[in-house]
Amino acid sequence: AGAIPPLVALLTSGTAEAKVKAAGALGNLASGSSETRTAMVAAGAIPPLVALLTSGTAEAKENAAMALGKLALSSENETAMVAAGAILPLVAVLKSGTVEAKKNAALALGNLASGSSENQAAIADAGAIPPLVALLTSGTAEAKENAAMALGKLALSSENE
């Protein structure tokens, strides 16, 4: 947990390559316990990860989307992600990112849609459904799985049927 604050700091103050590495490290750490994810949010990781989705290099966008997708595994983090404006940049990455970034954005959006009908509606309103459907036919096997999962979560909302 001691590595989290300096990694978060690198997301805003590091070189382009440092931002890529820091986002990747945070994504790997977010794969662990919910306590680790909570510590990442407490350290302020979400806003700079969201910022990387729009201002980072292609690889930074991939890693930021992965980290956000893993952070969204903890439902208590979903509110912070939505408040930080994560949905629109994730949809933008889903539409125009690299293959890896699209896969990670689909995972993040699916996890964000898991527990909240408000999130499901916001994700659909942001235009996520058409690029998720496109990913079902054009993505890698894992991207197709993530897109199918996200669409399944979005279908839980009667507004999106």
Image (cartoon, rainbow, N blue to C red):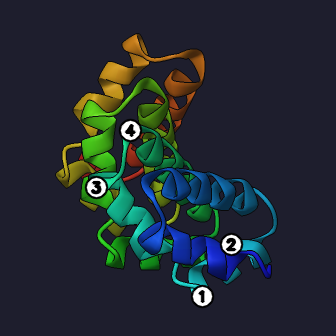
For label 2, the SS is: helix
Label 4 packing within 10 angstroms: few (<14), some (14-19), many (20+): some
Q: Identify the residue under disc 4.
A: 58
What amino acid is at disc 3? Ser
Label 4 with label 1: CB-CB less than 8 Å? no
Name the residue located 80 percent from the left edge and 61 percent from the top edge: 32
Q: Residues within 10 Å of mark 3 (few under 14, many from 20)?
A: few
- Please tell me how many numbered marks the rendered image carries: 4
Residue type at tag 1: Ala
Q: Is residue 130 left or right of residue 75?
A: left
Q: Are marks 3 and 1 in contact (CB under 8 Å)?
A: no
Q: Measure the C-alpha gap from mark 2 to mark 3.
A: 23 Å
Amino acid type, label 2? Arg
Mark found first going from the N terminus, 2 or 1: 2
Q: Marks 3 and 4, Cα distance to the nearest angstrom?
A: 9 Å
Residue 67 pos. (x, y %): 57, 56
- Kindly report the distance in space between the C-alpha atoms of the residues bearing marks 2 and 1: 9 Å
Of the 4 image quadrants, the one containing the N terminus is bottom right
Q: Which residue is mark 1?
A: 42
> Tag 3's secondary structure?
helix
Q: Kindly state the secondary structure of the residue where label 1 is placed.
A: helix
Q: CA gap, disc 3 to disc 1?
A: 23 Å
- Say which label, 4 or 2, has the lower sequence index: 2
- Assess whether mark 2 and mark 4 are in contact (beta carbons under 8 angstroms): no
Q: Residues within 10 Å of mark 2 (few under 14, many from 20)?
A: many
Looking at the image, do the residues carrying marks 3 and 4 touch, with CB atoms under 8 Å apart? no
Q: CA distance from mark 4 to mark 2?
A: 24 Å
Left or right side of 69 for 31: right
Q: In this rendering, does residue 121 appear at all? A: no
Identify the disc placed on residue 137: none
- Residue 37 is labelled as 2
